[in-house]
Amino acid sequence: MKPRVLPVVFLTLFVALSALTVAAAPPNIVLILADDLGYGDTGCYGATALKTPNIDRLAREGLRFTDAHTTSATCTPSRFALLTGQYAFRQKGTGILAGDAALIIEPGRFTLPLMLRKAGYRTGVVGKWHLGLGTGGVDWNAEVKPGPLEVGFTDSYIMAATGDRVPCVFLDGHRVVKLDAADPIAVSYGRKIGDEPTGKENPELLRVHPSHGHDQTIINGISRIGYMTGGQTARWVDEDLPDTFLREAQGFIERSKGAPFFLYYATHEPHVPRVPHPRFVGATTMGPRGDAIAQLDWSVGEILATLDRLGLAENTLILFSSDNGPVINDGYRDESVAKLGAHQPGGVLRGGKYSNFEGGTRVPFIVRWPARVKPGESAALVCQVDLLASFAALTGQALPADAAPDSFDVLPALLGESALGRDHLIEHASNTALRSGPWKYIPPGNGSKRTAATNIETGNDPAAQLYDLAADPGETRNLAEEQPERVTAMAARLEQIKAAGRSRP
């Protein structure tokens, strides 16, 4: 009797068609955005003193980018650009916001979550927001809106600003979580309110002391920026932040698993105040900052485990990155400088958070999508501002003519199908610099060359600066005097792009 090979053929065909179906289906998208994580802060980007096995796993199983950027060297403007597809310097009021600032993304604007929602995605944000809430004069005891739900998200569980700014509470949708109506919240950034102790007046009550600023209302033994009264039952415990945000992120994935979803998971680590959970205290030799990065890596691993458990990993595009470059002393005396050792948070890059040097905006950037993206490394120039146009292309959505003016479709680069990304990029800190291929131009600037509080090189200099990053990624050799024609051309192009109001064709 002849062997029955026909069923084997059918089985092979079925498996092949199933793989094609998975690859063709709209992928789930999980964007994990760390806070103040530097280019050199993970093992897959060269760190040896820090162990980041879960982030390294993403890099091993995905595509690791070596020239990927935020638009700005600080958090509010870079997050604004990521969600809107527009450079933040084009809109006033997009600098680092107070915790009670009004929403800076107008409701109805074509945003990344709104675009994906139109494509049939459930869209959730969990973690740090820092893009303002309400229209000014927020009443934290009523519905707090507009906010994430008004700019495209279907689900929202956030902190209003940062861990070092009041109000130190969570918001689920439009409401503060666990708020007691008999203990209303009041917040002020202009003057002291109430009689709660402050770090400046009562340093004996602190368990973490400020190094500069951060000396106002004390919450959980840590003084913050801004004044707050009330809301005692609603106030977070710093050590529990990662567990809380992780639980909410996992819950969103569970609720959304039946259809395509987009999760913007904005972790707090390693932003100040660095108060890791006791499970991670001592996980590294670097004190709270190193331990916070270990905690971040654990959170990434838990997200991966959730996707694996639910059978979603194959067709989920995970993008891991950071909102700007690294900073060591950013307001608290937490031994992060003393215990840094030989570790270089920015790797070979110069500068860091607040800087126009590459360390300000060049960040870790990893894409993993097992169904479609082959593991490897890419030197393509890409930016977080490009996610809107690129994911629109991925999901078959057309961009309105007036939307995402600075977002380029670099989807082939993100998927590893092309070695080319965008041809230029404006990097924004105290000044605006231009990347054009491997060349970097920083215009003359009159500000200080180094920040007094954080000890970071700003990139400011009275003379123009020009660097060939292909040969000199650390920006050590200024070639401006040797190549005046290139300086003139790049200066003119920078001004033209800024004046045009858009860079997308």
Image (spheres, helix red, strand yellow):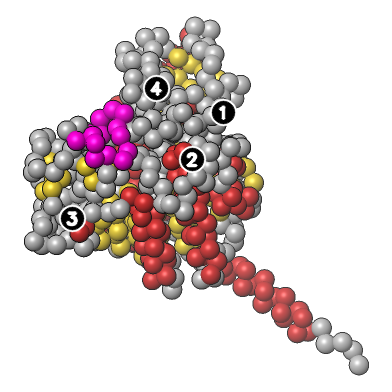
Q: Which mark is residue 342?
A: 1
Q: How many marks?
A: 4
Mark closest to the chain's N terminus, 2 or 3: 3
Q: Earlier in the sequence, mark 2 or mark 1?
A: 2
Q: Looking at the image, is mark 3 or mark 4 nearer the viewer?
A: 3
Instruction: Name the residue that disc number 4 marks.
Output: 455
Q: Which circle, 2 or 4, is nearer the viewer?
A: 2
What kind of residue is marked 4?
Answer: Asn
Q: Nearer the viewer, residue 333 or 253?
A: 333
Q: Is 206 covered by the magenta stretch? A: yes
Give the residue furthest to the top: 481
Q: Which residue is mark 3?
A: 232
Query: Label 1: few (<14), some or many (≥20) within 10 Å?
Result: few
At a point 24% along the width and 49% down the height, the residue shown is 168
Q: Secondary structure at mark 3?
A: helix
Label 3 environment density (alpha carbons within 10 Å; few <14, some 14–19, many ≥20): some
